[in-house]
Amino acid sequence: MQMMIVYRIGRFFMKLSLRDKFPEMTVNTTKGEIHLPEDYHGKWFILFSHPADFTPVCTTEFVGFQKKKKQFEELGVELIGLSVDNLESHQKWIQWIKENIYVQIDFPVIDDEKRIVSETLGLIQPNADDTTTVRAVIIVDHNGKVRTILEYPKEIGRSIDEILRTVKALKLASTKKVFSPANWPHNEIIDKVLFHRGENDDPALDKERGICCLSDWFIYKNLEE
């Protein structure tokens, strides 16, 4: 397994890589104790981290995730928030959002006041001036494997639509064995997907199957095929 070991605050921790097994851990959240990734076996989940409670960019992201929560659930994906504050602070922040933005945050938020989860997942930059987490997104599949890691600076809010698109593309790749081109599903080849031709594929049937072959390595087709 590829890993990067970083030393910080007297501890060693691993920087996650794609296809790594998500580390086993028990976390306290606003919805009770959760065992990761065991409690989500058979489901996908997204863990997204935040530098602190009561920060403006993070607040808009919490609201954004909540508004898209049903769409994630329809894809079989659960949401988990994380911030380096305690449960009392989380609850007050959630209440503030409800009273001022009129959105009820329903997903669990991890208590990480001691930074243990953040350090275990490699979410604290080793050369940073403080110990707040990066704004990260970790997408984990139904087998507990890390499928995508996205990191954003504190100054830039995440695009929830892009995260939703990424999940759709990952699940499509897992079930249909195809590849999503740039800007899928609104791309230069309309909404088609890329794939590798199988040994039993007959090129003579390409036209009726909606397959376009520009070369032996650039082949795309309709998604429903």
Image (cartoon, grey):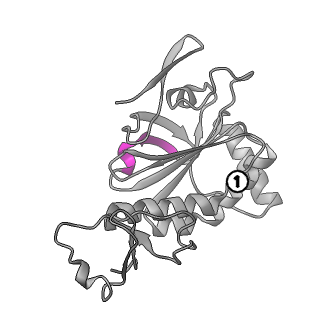
Q: From the viewer's perspective, is residue 28 above or below residue 72?
A: above
Q: Picture quarter containing residue 89? A: top right
Q: From the viewer's perspective, is residue 108 above or below residue 8?
A: below
Q: Where is residue 41 in the image (x, y as percent from the top left)?
A: 34, 50
Which residue of the protein is positioned furthest toward the bottom in this rendering?
Answer: 208
Horizontal placement of 214 versus 135: left or right?
Answer: left
Horizontal placement of 57 versus 1: left or right?
Answer: right
Which residue of the protein is positioned furthest toward the left in this rendering?
Answer: 200
Magenta stretch containing residue 155, yes or no? Answer: no
Q: Mark 1 points at which residue?
A: 61
Q: Where is residue 44 in the image (x, y as percent from the top left)?
A: 42, 55
Q: 208 or 75, which lies in front?
A: 208
Which residue of the protein is positioned furthest toward the front in this rendering?
Answer: 215
Q: From the viewer's perspective, is residue 161 above or below residue 222?
A: above
Which residue appears at 51% of the width and 51% of the height?
Answer: 46
Which residue appears at 40% of the width and 71% of the height?
Answer: 214
Q: 174 or 84, which lies in front?
A: 174
Q: From the viewer's perspective, is residue 63 above or below residue 194?
A: above
Identify the amino acid type marked 1.
Answer: Glu
- The span shown in magenta is 32-40
Q: How many marks?
A: 1
Horizontal placement of 189 versus 196: left or right?
Answer: right
Q: Position of residue 72 (x, y in %)?
A: 52, 64
Q: Picture quarter containing residue 188? A: bottom right
Magenta stretch containing residue 33, yes or no? Answer: yes
Q: Where is residue 70 in the image (x, y as percent from the top left)?
A: 55, 68
Which residue appears at 75% of the width and 21% of the height?
Answer: 129
Horizontal placement of 143 versus 7: left or right?
Answer: left
Graded by Cα atoms within 10 Å as few (under 14), some (14 to 19) or many (20 or more), the crowding at tag 1 reads some
